[in-house]
Image: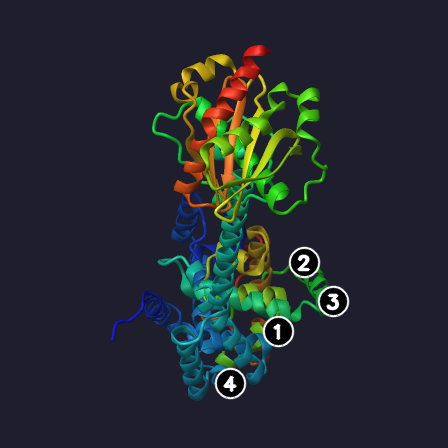
Amino acid sequence: MFKSIRQLHRENQWTAFEAEALPHLSALFRLAMWLVRERAEAEDLVQDTFTQALQSFHRYEKGTNCRAWLIRVMFHINSNRRRASARLQIINETDERIAETAAFDPPTPQGLTEEEVLRALRSLPRPFEEVVLLSDIEDMTYKEIADTLGVPIGTVMSRLHRGRKLMRAELASYANSRGIGHKTGEPSASSAGK
Amino acid sequence: MQCREFREVADSYLSDELLVETNHDMIAHLEGCAECRRELAARRELRTALRASFDKAEELQIRDQFADRVRRELRDAAMIKATPISRRRVWVAIAACLLVAAAVALSVVWQRQRAQTPGQIAGGNRPEPNVAQVKPTDIQPHLAPTAGDADMVLAKMSELAAGDHRDCAINHRLPQSPIDLEEAGHKYDQAFLNLKNAVRSHLTDSNAEIELVGAHACIFKGRWFAHIVLRHRGRLASLLVTRLDHAEGSPAQAKSTEVDQHGQIIACATASGYQISCLRTARHAIFVVSDLAEGENLALARGLAPSVYKHIKSAEDIT
């Protein structure tokens, strides 16, 4: 008849978790699916993420960005799973070096399809893909991205800059191949060099 | 601000991550540069398109069944099952309880060990533990209401007397064999000389049903006792006399105890089921120990007290 204090505490915790965290379930699944690409693996990752988040929910500061907190939990779990792969790190370093060499800053093409936009994002090296994803899609701040990836804010900023530049270059190549130009005027050589 | 600089930070501007001053510079540049306005609008549009594409991409959508299962399992985990952290807390709580229990047990053991020293029982100043066989918890001094320092000395010494009675008269297991009382009188304490005769004459005069079983001097826990073993009502009783050292038996202390100067014996303590009645002179403590009832033991002691007190007092006066 009477609920124990422990039971009430559990109910309250669940109510708070249900209200704050569960609305982000679909968004986190999309992110997980994008990162791991396999549905079964993505479901495992999301399940583990929410289970871990429920257990650690007392650490979540109410009023802060719960979605960013959940994403951080998910990246932590996912990075632990991938940690064994030393090869990945080598590839990342190579990608960083390639990105450094992309000096040309192309204008942003318009009139592209959704599929082309996603393909351009997918074409990015993983470190740049992650920061663009977290910034432009998940709308996380530089600080939240830095905390999630465990890198300095300066690294986030430079990766974002390079990643977006690479993405624009990729999109420009799609646009050129389809004969799509800019809606209003191409950036002139003079304006690019201003 | 130049167009190149504008494009460098255009995305940060869209993310609202720029300093206020830089924002002002951006706005100022935008007002005069149509090309950068278009570029900014294109980037904003690309960002919107990217987000929309991502949100709508069919292959990225969650299955309803999976979403329902996750919700259900999480709810079960939250409401019914203990989470791993909860379990960890339970174990921490159990460990804390065990620690507290261990601390309490150690405290009890420590208290008992402290209580085994007679100084702790009577609040006195004896440094060495004694009477190992006498359970300290059994010792219950019940001194006269006017008991002072002299009585406390007797109370402490009574534990030794009880131990000697048990180990010598009852169990015959003293580590050192007793010696003749007269010999001890010559060697250690002249008050022991003729003590046996003093007791015997009392027994003869009083016609009491007390049998003199034996007399000797024995050492218990480093202290010499004149030990007269008696039998009364089928029970063994011990009359024990020991000399007090300077700290225990200063004349000033003895004189301050009026009852002692009159040779009045008092019920002193009980230890391990033994009744102990005691009396002191200026330099000696006298005990009667038995497992008789308290009143019987006290009566026995009171019967013996005048002749024993007189004998010891005379010896002290001579020396």
Left or right: A61, with B102 as reference point: left
Query: Do marks 4 and 2 both belong to one polypeptide chain?
Result: no
Mark 2 or mark 3, earlier in chain: 3
Question: Spatial distance from mark 3 to mark 1, Cα to Cα?
Answer: 21 Å
Q: Nearer the viewer, mark 3 or mark 1?
A: 3
Question: Spatial distance from mark 2 to mark 1, Cα to Cα?
Answer: 16 Å
SS for dot 4: helix
Q: How is the image coloured?
A: rainbow
Residue hosting label 3 = A86
Amino acid type shown at disc 1: Ser
SS for dot 2: helix
In percent of the image, x 54 and y 54: which residue is there? B8
Residue hosting label 2 = A100
SS for dot 3: helix
Instruction: In the rendered structure, find residue A123 and report the number of the disc placed on it.
Output: 1
Residue hosting label 4 = B59
What chain is tagged by disc 2? A
User: Looking at this view, is B53 or B297 the one in front?
Assistant: B297
